[in-house]
Image (cartoon, rainbow, N blue to C red):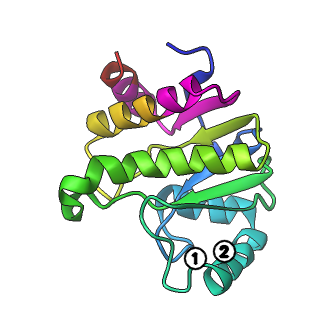
Amino acid sequence: MNDNIIIKTGDITKENVCAIVNAANSSLLGGGGVDGAIHRAGGPDILEACRKVRQEQYPDGLPTGEAVATTGGKLPARYVIHTVGPVYRSCGERCASLLSASYENSLRKAVELGCRDIAFPAISTGIYGYPKEEAARIAYETVRKFLAEGHDLKVSFIFHSEEGKKVFEKAIV
């Protein structure tokens, strides 16, 4: 296990890190699950920043695998990095590369922002239906390779339940 990778249970909206990652939908205007929790806890500044991103950068919505940053609003995190993971039933042969891109582009955005730490949820494993074990392996390998490039970043994987954490830990051994 890499010393710069932490796996734990908790509430991502309470993480005291430079950036948390939002498993967003392409509209960037909020939703359910992690997305809804981040928007509720962070307040209206996040939604306003997302609207601005839509107007200025992505009028048709954020493409799958891309990442953008906004303020953290009322969250302890300074930034929210929004990324859209793939919908498993409709991504076909591109599923793994799209999921990996969500993690890698989020990591690159954190470095670009000067962050030293970042917290991730399990992208695409909720309503988007990505099998948890496969998603865990892709997430861990993507982060491990990124850190091996020499990036000095502490990466946390935050799971809402002990069960989710155990699935992740078992999958990456």
Between 89 and 56, which is closer to the camera in this rendering?
Answer: 56
- In the rendered image, residue 161, in percent from the top left (x then y), is placed at 46, 35
Mark 1: amino acid: Leu
In the rendered image, which residue does mark 1 sit on?
Answer: 29
Between 31 and 155, which is closer to the camera in this rendering?
Answer: 155
Quadrant assignment for the C terminus: top left
The answer to whether 59 appears left or right of 152 in the picture is: left
Name the residue rendered at 33%, 20% in the picture: 170
Between 55 and 157, which is closer to the camera in this rendering?
Answer: 55
Name the residue rendered at 49%, 45% in the picture: 103
Residue 11 seen: no
How many dots with numbers? 2
User: In the image, is residue 158 part of the stretch drawn in magenta?
Assistant: yes
Calculate the distance from the C-alpha at mark 1 to the C-alpha at mark 2.
Answer: 7 Å
Residue 119, which numbered label? none
Q: Which stretch appears magenta?
A: 143-168
Q: Do the residues labelled 1 and 2 touch (CB within 8 Å)?
A: yes
Determine whether 150 is above or below 39 in the image: above
Quarter holding residue 49: bottom right
The answer to whether 104 appears left or right of 76 in the picture is: left
In the rendered image, which residue does mark 2 sit on?
Answer: 50
Q: Is mark 2 on a helix, strand or loop?
A: helix
Determine whether 58 is above or below 6 in the image: below
Name the residue rendered at 68%, 30% in the picture: 153
